Image (cartoon, rainbow, N blue to C red):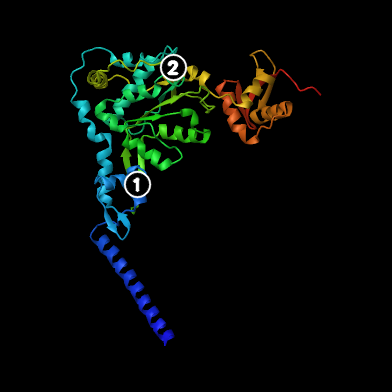
Amino acid sequence: MESAAFKKLTEQLTEIVQYVRLAKMAFQENLTGKGLKPMLTNDDAAKMLGVSKRTLQRMRSENRIDFIKIGNQCRYQVEAIERMVEERTIAKETDYLYDLPHWDGKDRILALARTVPCNNPYWAELFHRWFLNMVAHWRGNTDKKYANSVSPLLVGAQGTRKSTFCRSIVPPELRAYYTDSIDFSRKRDAELYLNRFALINIDEFDQISSTQQGFLKHILQKPVVNVRKPYANAVLEMRRYASFIATSNQKDLLTDPSGSRRFICIEVTEAIDTNRPIDYNQLYAQAMHELDHGERYWFDQSDERIMTENNHDFEQIPPEEQLFYHYFRVAGNDEEGEWLSSAEILNRLRRYSAIPLSTKRVNVFGRILQKHEVPSRRTRFGTLYHVVECKRQED
């Protein structure tokens, strides 16, 4: 008897499960037929908004986001989240830039740059160019093929008010679009920041790994943000508004052997005067005036050469480079020397120094030789470099 009752109960439960499954399918088909979209989960909504799930929970408790409860699960309408994303971008705040007074002719951008004490004679001029580029991105009228791929990098001792200076660049009216919290290990979220913020401070730049610096190089050059919406096949193209600035307490920062033209590195020699009042209306009125009158806001090859030259002191010197100048030198024009490939030179360095140098670093080592303008020529065996061996390992 108990067995028959159990069997009947099992059959009833199976029917209920099938009914629920069919009802769910019908509901989804009804949504699709009406042009509606499935509801978003907490994970989906948090990713679209670029916030943590804890922040999302706080937004619910403060009634700052619409949601419904299905059992113990929270669900969100796609359209509502998309609307919040649009409303959070600086695109909605450009009225600030267009409601500014006429510029009085006083150069406040250079004055702001000069509040940062450093020994780089090009700092103020390069900061001026970067500042105009930043504002041009906020206005949203830059060419979508190019991005503000240059970032000032302030290096100095703790307590020199580097981060305070970075924050002070943004006017109070737009301060909500400033952040010093970006996680490059979460690549999708980091890319979304390009659309959602006006200025991103990479605080403690020295904590970024060499692998993450490769992604940073990619994101600095990214002119638009491509995002696939949840439950959709189409890719949404969103404009980039963000520019970058960075700070660090350490000096040997840059790991890209092909050059460092993406950073304006300066060493802050003493505390920055951040107590000096800033006339933000006139500061940004100057930027708008100069952009409206055709002032160049992009960096040209001359600027990049200056940045690369001045950034040598901030580069990490890899062991291959140190060993090369210990055992070799660049051949002069009248010297016979040797024409060797980067692999051949690297093999000798490994043999002479007894330091394990990975053969996987051959391409990197080749870029190091090119960076130092070692004479080279192309052959059917690859690129050869003209060098003189100046120190051999004793037999």
Is 251 positioned to the left or the right of 173 in the image? Answer: right
As displayed, is residue 4 above or below residue 81? below
Q: Residue at x 33, y 74 (%)?
A: 16
Where residue 74 appears, as percent x and y from the top left, is 31, 54
Q: Nearest the camera: 158 or 201?
A: 158
Closer to the chain start, of discs 2 and 1, is 1
Q: Nearest the camera: 225 or 188?
A: 188
Please tell me how many numbered marks the rendered image carries. Answer: 2
Badge 1 marks a residue whose secondary structure is helix
Quickly name the residue at label 2: 268
Using the rendered image of the protein, determine whether residue 141 is visible from the camera's viewpoint. no
Is 35 positioned to the left or the right of 166 in the image? Answer: left
Categorize mark 2 by other alpha carbons within 10 Å: few (<14), some (14-19), many (20+): many
Determine the image quadrant of residue 93: top left
Determine the image quadrant of residue 152: top left
Where residue 9 appears, as percent x and y from the top left, is 38, 80
Q: In which quadrant of the rendered image does the N terminus lie?
A: bottom left
Q: Residue at x 49, y 31 (%)?
A: 207
Badge 2 marks a residue whose secondary structure is loop
Q: Nearest the camera: 206 or 265?
A: 206
